[in-house]
């Protein structure tokens, strides 16, 4: 974390826009190093050249002075002062020396470039020796002049001094040219560098700024104002900003699309309404006016036999066999007078294992003047089958009730009209009335039992049932009926009849239904055998064996359904409620037992009712 | 394992008999159930009265069947569940994935 001190510290970088600091610092450092290097090279070069020139110049001066000194000694030895002076004049005229002077200590000047000085006419014969005078060369940087003192020996005698003044600046004029040229070249280089730097500074700044923005983005920064760079930083910066802008637009478009989708799928994706709709067993589909499917829950896709991926966002026509639904949707959407339409697709009567009856409700949904249709689909196959069975049952029950009632009414009228005169007729009428009344009682009992089973309120009592009496009554009831129908009826009873714990009325009802069915569906001349066996634990096995019409294998389980009768045209004229076997099985199961069937078409059937013994029954309870 | 199929009105009842303890059993149960499920739009019950035991193969098959049904907003309706199977389902924490009924009739009535 920055401390107040560090925050207040002077930071030159804050005066630069993003990336400028880096480029400016790097650029300036580069230029400074370059300038320093160029300056150093030029200085060293010039200094080296200067030193070389000076050394060369000094050498030339030394040689010139030695040459002049030797010539002067020769002239002086010959006493040719005029020749000496011409020599010196020529040297001065040629620029080799600027000034010259040959003097004798205390005797005068022999030759001098200064014309105002008096000179001696002849060289004296002798002069005072000055052996301590030594040759010297002195340079004055201010005047760029070099003074050379050279002792001359004339006839082996010292004392004569040659003084030469040479302007050495003339000698090193070449070094200055090189220095000037180098400085000029360096200056041009610097100017060029500055121009290049100024030319590319912005673009380099742009790249550096983009680099900084990328680093920030990699750290998770997503705010557009932070990631944008200065437009004045060049083409790259503009391109970067354009890309960021497009990304922002795309993200916004995505958000807008999600909002639209959320709105069209219920607008509450976040609270899981679509997920909740998917738990519905009823199908829900939302379609646009052009039949585009905006939403479909899982149940709708199952009912319409489509997958959701291929259905949603495509048209309703994607669903197979959807012509009626499409027509209804178009009717609801285009006809303002119709806001709701109900269809029922499929036929309950023909609904096999793969069929279905679908109830489809199409409702118009107007939202901000945009018409849409909500399709609600419900599988009502089982309801319609139950309705159909119930209607058939009511029709059958009505017929079943009407037949004995009609018989009772007719015999009652006949007994009333002529019973007092004909005792035999009266007795027959009363017997028929009694028999039909008992039949009515059984039918009503079955209906009540069905109602109780439907309501789940059918309970089984645990009476002590004397089985001998139970089967005697059964035998008594059906022997006469079988005889009337010319059916051979055999009761195969065990030698001993134990007492069992069961609901006597319900068990009797189940046994009556089984034996009654056998008699009812066995044609005249047939045979029905009732076989009763008890196990050691008093478990009951009750078999009804007939050689009647038999039951097709495909129907053998269906006949135990409520209100169902086997699909066989041979029994169409035989009255029956379709409840008997269902009730028999339910009653047996309530006792912990079962009713099973084995049958072969045209050969007969065996219905077996089993009731477990007391211990097993207690477990089942 | 033997699997019987019968219909109660528009509802198909599958009755597996015997333990489901091998991969073959589970595959058979799954295949037959999926076939019925696809044909009946989910009007489908499994009577497990005679399914004496299931191991992980069987449980996996049951879960896959109910998951398939859940795509249509339904779940597998089981009836006649033995104490053993109920305990296994409780231990593996999959009880809530299924609807349970006392007997076939009650389960069939749930489609009304």
Image (cartoon, rainbow, N blue to C red):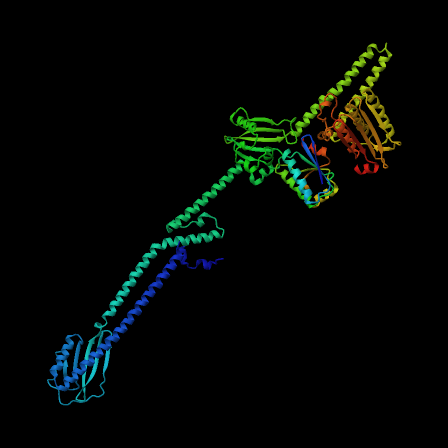
Residue A379 in sight from this viewpoint = yes
Q: Residue at x 25, y 70 (%)?
A: A175
- Residue A422 occupies quadrant: top right
Kindly tell me whether residue A18 is visible in this rendering.
Answer: no
Q: Measured along the vertical axis of the image, is residue A555 above or below residue A274? A: above
Where residue A555 sits in the image (x, y, percent)?
71, 29
Which residue occupies the foreground of this view, A264 or A103?
A264
In the image: residue B72, left or right of residue A532: left
Placement of B27 over or under A37, stated as above or below: above
Residue at the farthest right position: A495
Residue B2: image location, x then y, percent: 72, 39
The quarter of the displayed image where residue A270 is located: top right
Q: In this view, does A360 lie above or below B21?
A: above
Name the foreground residue: A569 vs A540: A569
Q: In which quarter of the image is the C terminus of chain A?
A: top right
Question: What residue do we see at 78% from left, 15% from top?
Answer: A409
Residue A266 image position (x, y, % from top left): 55, 36
Q: In this view, does A389 lie to the left or right of A298?
A: right
Find residue A173 and report its horizontal and vertical position in percent.
23, 70
- In the displayed structure image, the side of residue A462 where residue A72 appears, left or right: left
Q: How many labels does the image show?
A: 0
């Amino acid at each position: 974390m920055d401390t107040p001190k560090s925050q207040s510290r002077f930071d030159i970088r804050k005066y630069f826009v993003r990336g400028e600091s880096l480029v400016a610092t790097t650029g300036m450092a580069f230029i400074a190093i370059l300038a320093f290097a160029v300056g150093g090279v030029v200085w060293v070069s010039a200094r080296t050249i200067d030193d070389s020139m000076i050394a060369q110049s000094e050498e030339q001066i030394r040689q010139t002075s030695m040459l002049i000194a030797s010539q002067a000694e020769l002239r002086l030895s010959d006493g040719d002062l005029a020749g000496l002076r011409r020599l010196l004049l020529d040297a001065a005229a040629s620029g080799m020396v600027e000034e010259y002077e040959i003097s004798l200590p205390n005797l005068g000047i022999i030759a001098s470039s200064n014309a105002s000085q008096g000179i001696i006419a002849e060289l004296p014969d002798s002069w005072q020796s000055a052996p301590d005078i030594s040759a010297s060369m002195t340079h004055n940087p201010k005047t760029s002049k070099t003074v050379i003192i050279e002792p001359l020996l004339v006839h082996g005698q010292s004392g004569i001094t040659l003084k030469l003044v040479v302007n050495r600046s003339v000698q090193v004029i070449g070094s200055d040219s090189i220095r000037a040229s180098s400085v000029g070249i360096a200056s041009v280089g610097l100017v060029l560098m500055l121009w290049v730097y100024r030319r590319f500074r912005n673009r380099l700044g742009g790249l550096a700024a983009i680099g900084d923005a990328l680093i920030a983005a990699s750290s998770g920064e997503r705010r557009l104002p932070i990631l944008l760079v200065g437009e004045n930083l060049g083409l790259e910066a503009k391109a970067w900003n354009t890309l960021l802008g497009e990304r922002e637009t795309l993200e916004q478009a995505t958000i807008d699309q999600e909002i639209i989708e959320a709105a069209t799928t219920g607008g509450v994706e976040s609270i899981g309404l679509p997920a909740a709709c998917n738990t519905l067993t009823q199908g829900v589909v939302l379609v646009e006016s052009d039949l585009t499917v905006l939403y479909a829950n899982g149940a709708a896709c199952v009912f319409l036999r489509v997958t959701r991926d291929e259905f949603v966002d495509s048209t309703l026509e994607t669903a197979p066999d959807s012509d009626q639904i499409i027509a209804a949707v178009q009717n609801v959407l285009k006809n303002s007078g119709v806001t709701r339409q109900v269809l029922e697709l499929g036929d309950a009567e023909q609904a096999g294992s793969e069929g279905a009856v679908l109830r489809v409700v199409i409702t118009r949904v107007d939202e901000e003047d945009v018409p849409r249709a909500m399709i609600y689909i419900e599988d009502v196959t089982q309801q319609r089958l139950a309705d159909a069975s119930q209607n058939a049952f009511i029709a059958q029950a009505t017929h079943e009730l009407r037949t004995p009632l009609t018989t009772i009414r007719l015999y009652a009228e006949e007994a009333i009209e002529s019973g007092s005169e004909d005792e035999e007729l009266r007795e027959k009428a009363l017997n028929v009335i009694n028999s039909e009344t008992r039949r009515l009682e059984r039918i009503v009992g079955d209906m009540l039992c069905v109602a109780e089973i439907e309501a789940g309120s059918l309970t089984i009592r645990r009476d002590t049932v004397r089985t001998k009496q139970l089967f005697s009554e059964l035998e008594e009831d059906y022997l006469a009926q079988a005889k009337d129908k010319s059916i051979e009826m055999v009761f195969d009873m065990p030698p001993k009849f134990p007492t069992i714990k069961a609901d006597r009325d319900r068990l009797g009802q189940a046994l009556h239904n089984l034996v009654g069915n056998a008699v009812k569906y066995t044609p005249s001349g047939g045979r029905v055998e009732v076989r009763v066996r008890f196990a050691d634990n008093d478990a009951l096995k009750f078999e009804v064996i007939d050689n009647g019409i038999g039951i097709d294998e495909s129907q053998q389980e269906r006949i135990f359904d409520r209100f169902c009768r086997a699909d066989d045209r041979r029994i169409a004229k035989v009255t029956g409620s379709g409840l008997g076997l269902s009730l028999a099985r339910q009653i047996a199961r309530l006792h912990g037992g079962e009713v099973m069937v084995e049958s072969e078409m045209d050969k007969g059937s065996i219905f077996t009712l089993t009731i477990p013994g007391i211990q097993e029954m207690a477990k089942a309870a | 394992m033997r699997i019987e199929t019968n219909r109660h009105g528009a509802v198909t009842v599958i009755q597996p008999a015997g333990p489901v303890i091998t991969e073959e059993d589970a595959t058979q149960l799954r295949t037959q159930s999926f076939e019925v499920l696809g044909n009946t739009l989910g009007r489908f019950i499994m009577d497990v009265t005679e399914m004496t035991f299931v191991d992980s193969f069987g449980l996996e098959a049951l879960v896959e069947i109910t998951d398939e049904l859940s795509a249509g907003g339904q779940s597998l309706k089981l009836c006649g569940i033995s104490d053993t199977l109920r305990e296994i389902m409780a231990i593996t924490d999959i009880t809530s994935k299924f609807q349970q009924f006392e007997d076939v009739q009650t389960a069939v009535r749930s489609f009304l």
